[in-house]
Amino acid sequence: MDLIKRPRRLRNSPGLRKLVRETNISVEDFIYPMFVTEGTGIEREISSMPGINHYSVDRLLFRLEKVEKAGIPGVLLFGVPDEKDEVGTGAFCSDGIVQKALRQAKQRFPELVLSADLCLCEYTSHGHCGIIKDNKIDNDLTLEVLAKAAVSLADAGADIIAPSDMMDGRVAAIRKDLDGSSFTDKAIMAYSAKYASAFYGPFRDAAGSAPAFGDRKTYQMDYHGRKEAMKEIELDIDEGADIIMVKPALAYLDIIHEAASRYDYPLAAYNVSGEYCMIKAAAEKGWIDEKGAALEFLTAIKRAGADIIISYFAIDAAAWLK
């Protein structure tokens, strides 16, 4: 056959494929999410998240050393407190579990970017992301608590405050209180388009944050929608977010792509616990190759337009990419 154009020519060897490769992922793209708990000497695997652990602060520091050596720029910390109450006091008290972890981590690893998740679900006895009043989530009352918690986390050493609650107006409230407390240099990475997803189950086991009643569909987004995500992202940008986020990642690659096309802002995507565990479970069964599947997924997230990938695969991926 007289074929002038043969795309296969550039697939003929690993070197050629690398030479013309359009999308490359790098260890510098990652943020590694971690769970910190009370106590000492604790490094306990989470049963529903193989390879992911609860860490007490002392053991967290050892893990952070590995994160830094792997070349991963930063981590995202979630707190698992011993005690909870109706208003999520542990989220904003100065000796909260994440606050304690931040102080020690910042002292030991000053170059590591420390992000602190900001939500009440891990700290409330009812497991919801906001304050309950008259059997409903009170949006505006919750903003006061979130802003207070943001200042507490910033004071403890967080470089990035990451509100994941999906309350209306929370970025503006947080930015106002951070700036009013002389934390103008602290960045906000907003969970801007966070969907009410079935892929959060293992995380809720890890954080002990499953709601005691009802669900989160009145504040997290309906997964049938696309336009609403753009509205939420625009609102967060207008309110002062420095980084925007889409969560989850894999079922929402279209949302990541559209956000990257529309907004000239750093864009994060959260490769969530359910997405991670699907690969781990299938790999344990021998049904798929874990490394190959994980790198393919992570590349898809980057190819869709994400600048930052929050993933439980980050440490493994750093080793694979070498």
Image: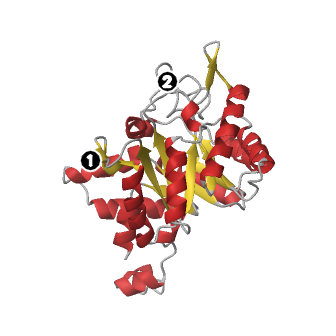
User: Is 242 situated left or right of 66 in this image?
Assistant: right
Category of crowding for the residue at label 2, using alpha-carbon neighbours closer than 10 angstroms: few (below 14), some (14–19), many (at least 20): some
How far across and how far down the image is residue 205, in percent? 37, 35
User: Looking at the picture, how far across and down is residue 81, in whole percent?
Assistant: 45, 36
In this orientation, which residue lies closer to the viewer: 32 or 257? 32
Label 1: few (<14), some or many (≥20) within 10 Å?
A: some
- For the residue pair 75 and 193, the one nearer the viewer reads as 75
> For the residue marked with disc 1, what is the amino acid?
Ala
Say which residue appears at 24% left-offset and 54% top-offset: 283
Q: Secondary structure at mark 1?
A: helix
For disc 2, the marked residue is 125
Question: Looking at the picture, does residue 180 appear above or below residue 311?
Answer: above
Residue that carries the numbered disc 1 in the rendered image: 281
- Tell me the amino acid under the disc marked 2: Ser
Question: Which residue does the image show at 46% across and 21% down from the upper left?
Answer: 212
Kindly give the residue lying farthest to the left in the view shown. 286
In what quadrant of the picture does the N terminus appear? bottom left
Q: From the viewer's perspective, is residue 214 above or below residue 230?
A: above
Q: Of the two numbered discs 1 and 2 on the same chain, state the one appearing first in sequence.
A: 2
